[in-house]
Amino acid sequence: MSDTPTIRPVGEGALLIEFGDRIDETINAKVVALDKALAARPPRGFLEAVPAYCSLLIEYDPQSTSQVELAEAALELAGSAPAAATSGREHVVPISFEPLDGPDLDQVAAQAGLDWEEAIAAFLASRYRVYMYGFAPGYAYMGGVPQVLQLPRKPIAQRGHPAGSVIIAGPQCLITTLPMPTGWWVIGRTPLAVLDATGERPFRFDPGDTIRFERIA
Amino acid sequence: MIARLQVEAAGPLTSLQDAGRRGVMRFGVPRSGPIDRFAFAAALTAAKPAEGTAIELSLGGLTLTCLEGEVGFALCGAAFTVEIDGRAIGSWCRATLGPGQCLRIRQSGGNWAYLAFSGSCTTPTWLGSRATHALSGLGGGMVRAGDVLELHATKPLPPAALQAPAPASHPAPIGIVIGPQERFFGAGALQRLCAEPFIATGTFDRMGRALDGAPLLPLRLDMPSEPALPGCLQITGDGRMTMLLADHQTTGGYPKIAAVIGADIDRLAQMEAGTAFHFEAVSVGEAVKRFRRIADWQAAALRALVSADDLALRLLGANLVGGVVDALGTHEA
């Protein structure tokens, strides 16, 4: 894909700026760079931006700007914003792999052809990049699950996993903030709250940050 | 004055809403706020609550008993019936609830209505807003049977039947802007989207509304999660369509074939279950034009509510409506 992003309308009040169509650190770095440029130099009518894996949504007020004007401003900012490879902070996230906390770890290990301890070692050896938040409050989508542990999601979502569950599917990993049914594999649980509803900084991570997991049980 | 209201019964979608929160979609937090923004604004205009907060009601309605104090209220939205102590006082209406009185609101057509109180509410804010994100319960909160709502600085309000804007006799099709992920569909699916009728189903919540019709099967489902907004028409692997609403998932991996234009999102959300409608693809420019037109029309309707209100208040001030108040039996001094 060329460096010029594709711009698509989302209704009359938003544009989707696409830098690619896959989960990739270089593409996501461009998303993060444009997001920062927009925050530093918001164009007229700009309301809010939503960074995702390989695209950025810009919501604007169509009463005070036009789609064309906003698209031109976004292209100019995207062209001038340097995409830094590593721009974020690093976080250490404690994780327990006890069977009650990670009920699917057995199955994940078996499908990977590893024993339980080998699967844990493989998971802990990787560094995880926060690509985006999505779905619901505080759901930080990370990439970096090692190849050997990458499994397609389960065919049916299963109920009853508590907030703080560490779940994986394909290359993606996330820490849940709500008790929700999920088709992802539940491999552990963290006492660390990504979403702290009453805290001064309610969301712990930013897109572009790096996560390292540290075993506590 | 302080009023305390006991929630006797509440439908599962009853929640506190204000205009919503901005700037946090990047953290997975949608704007929330009212599904029907005009009806919400009308309720606020008629009751003038201190913080711009109202209760959003839907199927299942709401029953409240006033434990102490008295408080004025207004109800606006779809065709809901409002009763005080078993006595019907209309659909769009304003009145005062006194100690011991029971307010019962039931849905009789359409899906969403707003109950605003003349007072200030004491529920928590989250990220600067009382809008409730229903899935997490964060914000002002869901309203459940057994809750007691406490309102401060309450005032009685003169009873009035409020003028609900007349519905169009020939409802226009629902405008859409094609995309952003129309490339995941074949020409046949895009053609059917604009040619065939769809049905607004009774399957909805604050996240979205299922729309029935010809299945629009995606060609493939290999899209990384992309951001979404209210109005987006998301198609799942089985070809079924959902219009996303105020509590939408902020991103999703299912392709969005089109987005309902701002002028028509709330109308489709309110559409009575089982109603058939057509989509009409329009340009972004036309969508902006239609939004302006409806915003002007709504502003005029709100001004009309206010001027009717001023008249009622002046009459009350001149002590001319006492007889009317007694006749309605909704405001016992």
Image (cartoon, coloured by chain):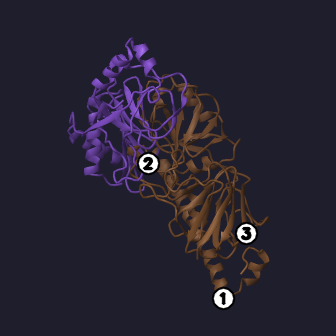
Chain colours: A purple, B brown
Residue with the mark numbered 1: B318
Hey, what amino acid is under mark 1?
Ala
Relative to A8, is B96 on the left or the right? right
- Give percent across and percent down for residue A51: 35, 40
The mark that comes first in sequence, 3 or 1, is 3
The C terminus of chain B sits in image quarter: bottom right
Hey, what amino acid is under mark 2?
Gly
Label 2 to label 1, Cα distance in Å? Answer: 47 Å
- Give percent across and percent down for residue B170: 69, 50
User: Which mark lies nearer to you, 2 or 1?
Assistant: 1
Relative to A11, is B331 on the left or the right? right
Hey, what amino acid is under mark 3?
Gln
Q: Chain of mark 1?
A: B
The secondary element bearing badge 3 is classed as loop
**Where is B69 relative to A140, above or below?**
below
Q: Which mark is residue A13?
A: 2
**Where is A126 relative to A201, above or below?**
above
- Give percent across and percent down for residue B86: 79, 64
Residue at the outermost top position:
A113
**How many numbered marks does the figure carry?**
3
Query: Quick one: B153 or A196, which is closer to the camera?
Result: A196
- Give percent across and percent down for residue B317: 64, 86
